[in-house]
């Protein structure tokens, strides 16, 4: 159950009204790092904001000043993870122009970034998978990191030499993101050493996606592509 959100400032809070100084940013990062450690060690549901504050050595009011609830901590984790994903993918996007190589590089980079959180993801999945949870990657609350991730897959497409059906091109980044969510779901349940099977899934699926994208320009397949896109747009609304 999500803890109730506390006011963003509290009486007697020494950080209330504090400008975005280096000290403030350090405190904020300390709280976030402490929270992620406790989430991994104890699980999301069993970790309270009070416990996070105690472990971080700050007042509970200070913790609530920076993060209104545990949900806000997870949303910040999503945002930081997305920044790390973009940074990890940058070399391959700068080096490669082939669609398959760019897509594979971004997918592998995503798994690289998530790897330290594999055990946590297994315990957290029940919360994030709940359709009404604000922590779902499909929720309104997760809109910002979701759009940032879709933008990364847009870079995959726009920076490649792939010849994509004009009708499919604007929708392809979101479709690739949905595919990435499928990879993440498989990764959560992957108990192979180092999640090697997830890597195999990526390496096996990318050539198929590459081929399907290339075939989308064929006149005989355009009606099918149109039907798929119409279905996606209908489900989106």
Image (spheres, rainbow, N blue to C red):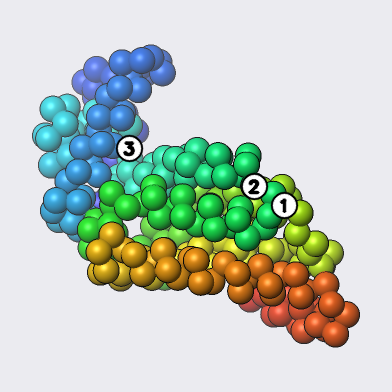
Q: Is residue 52 visible?
A: yes
- Residue 228: % across, % down: 71, 80
- Towards the viewer: 60 or 219: 219
- Residue 8: % across, % down: 34, 33
In the image: residue 221, left or right of residue 147: right
- Residue 162: % across, % down: 75, 59
Picture quarter with the N terminus: bottom left
Residue at 41% x, 18% y is 20
Q: Nearer the viewer, mark 2 or mark 3?
A: 2
C-alpha gap between disc 2 and disc 3: 39 Å
Q: Total of numbered circles in the picture?
A: 3
Q: Please tell me which of labels 1 and 2 falls first in the chain.
A: 2
Quarter of image, res 178 = bottom right
Q: Nearer the viewer, mark 1 or mark 2?
A: 2
Q: Which element carries disc 3, helix, strand or loop?
A: loop
- Residue 9: % across, % down: 31, 29
- Towards the viewer: 95 or 237: 95
What numbered label is drawn on residue 97? Answer: none
Decide: few, some or many residues near mark 3? Use Cα within 10 Å; few <14, some 14-19, many ≥20. Answer: many
Decide: few, some or many residues near mark 1? Use Cα within 10 Å; few <14, some 14-19, many ≥20. Answer: some
Residue at 76% x, 54% y is 161
Q: Which element carries disc 2, helix, strand or loop?
A: loop
C-alpha gap between disc 1 and disc 2: 8 Å
Q: Please tell me which of labels 3 and 1 falls first in the chain.
A: 3
Is the C-beta separation of discs 1 and 2 under 8 Å?
yes
What numbered label is drawn on residue 96? Answer: 2
Residue identified by numbered label 3: 67
Q: Is residue 75 visible?
A: no
Residue identified by numbered label 1: 160
Decide: few, some or many residues near mark 2? Use Cα within 10 Å; few <14, some 14-19, many ≥20. Answer: some
Up the image or down, 15 lies above or below 186; here it is above
């Amino acid at each position: 159950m999500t803890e109730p959100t506390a006011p963003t400032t509290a009486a007697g809070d020494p950080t209330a009204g504090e400008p975005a100084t280096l000290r403030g940013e350090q405190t904020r990062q300390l709280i976030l790092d402490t929270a992620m450690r406790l989430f991994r060690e104890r699980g999301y549901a069993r970790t309270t904001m009070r416990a996070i504050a105690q472990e971080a050595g700050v007042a509970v009011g200070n913790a609530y000043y920076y993060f209104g609830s545990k949900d806000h901590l997870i949303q910040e984790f999503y945002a930081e993870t997305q920044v790390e994903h973009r940074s990890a993918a940058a070399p391959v996007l700068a080096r490669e122009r082939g669609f398959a190589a760019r897509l594979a590089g971004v997918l592998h980079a995503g798994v690289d970034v998530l790897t330290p959180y594999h055990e946590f993801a297994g315990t957290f999945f029940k919360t994030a998978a709940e359709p009404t949870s604000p922590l779902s990657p499909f929720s309104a609350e997760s809109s910002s990191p979701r759009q940032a991730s879709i933008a990364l897959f847009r870079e995959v497409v726009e920076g490649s030499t792939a010849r994509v059906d004009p009708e499919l091109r604007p929708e392809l980044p979101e479709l690739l993101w949905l595919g990435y969510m499928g990879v993440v779901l498989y990764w959560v349940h992957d108990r192979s050493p180092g999640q090697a099977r997830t890597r195999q899934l990526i390496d096996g699926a990318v050539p198929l996606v590459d081929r399907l994208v290339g075939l989308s320009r064929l006149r005989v397949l355009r009606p099918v592509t149109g039907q798929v896109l119409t279905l996606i747009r209908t489900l989106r609304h």
